[in-house]
Amino acid sequence: MRKLMSFVLLLAVTVILVVFAVNNDTSNADEENKSSTKDDIETDRMNNDERPDLAVRGKDGPIRYPTNDNLRLAHIHIAVITYKTTFNNGGNPLNQESFQNALNGTKEKLTAIQYDGEKKDELQKAIDLTNQAIDQNAGKGDPILDDIHQNVHDLLEYFDGEAKDIEVDEIGNPLNEEDKIPGIDYSKW
């Protein structure tokens, strides 16, 4: 049952990321066509002020703590390219473009986090390492990816109380039988 719930959660997050990407592309085009006014700036400032900081155990109230969701999503992005969560890439290994997209997604989610508490240095380190990995065009097996993952993983454990990793092969299939969801034919991924 737990594995099924993990799979459903991963699937839901994937759908959310796709919807976000599509909406983001549309909203970026709309924003480029608008002129910046004082009212727009005030509205943006107000919306940012409404988002609370990261919260320890924020998973208990995800609507109240949307920045915790950004941390969870950053963890998923970096976990995919460090082979620590399942993913479906059509049965193909990740390519360099996949690594760069995941790093950019990690950066986007980390920089969207509002936080000024005792873990701010660790958060900034994760952002700095991610920027460095993007600049270096980091790819499969690059140790900086493991450093980023460990940093984000530790932050997620601190704020949410847990951060689960699943060791997978190069096409995203779980290596351990206990991590496989019954009824899923991974050979068709």
Image (cartoon, rainbow, N blue to C red):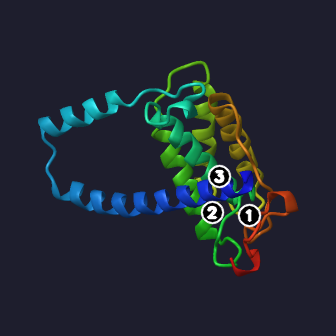
Compared across the picture, whether 168 is left or right of 22 comes to: right
Residue 159, above or below 177? above
Q: N-terminal of the two: label 3 or label 2? A: 3
Numbered disc in front, either 1 or 3: 3
Residue 78 badge: 3
Instruction: Give percent across and percent down for residue 57.
Output: 60, 27
Q: Quadrant of residue 122?
A: top right
Q: Is the C-beta separation of discs 1 and 2 under 8 Å?
A: yes
> Relative to residue 139, is residue 49 drawn left or right?
left
Q: Are discs 3 and 2 less than 8 Å apart at CB?
A: no
Callout 1: few (<14), some (14-19), or many (20+) C-alpha neighbours within 10 Å?
some
Q: Quadrant of the N terminus?
A: bottom right
Dot placed on the residue nearer the N-terminal end, 1 or 3: 3
Q: How far apart in space, not on screen, are marks 1 and 3 (Cα)?
A: 12 Å
Quadrant location of residue 156? top right
- Residue extending farthest to the top is 118
At mark 2, the secondary structure is helix
Kind of residue at badge 3: Ile
Say which residue label 1 marks.
140
Q: Nearer the viewer, residue 96 or 94?
A: 94
The answer, for residue 176, to whether it is visible in the render is no
Q: Nearer the viewer, residue 134 or 74?
A: 74
User: In terms of sequence position, does the residue under pointer 1 or pointer 2 come before the other?
Assistant: 2
Q: Which mark is residue 99?
A: 2
Q: Is 70 situated left or right of 152 in this image?
A: left
- The residue at the point 29 percent across, 57 percent down is 28
Q: Answer with the quarter of the image where residue 38 lies.
A: top left
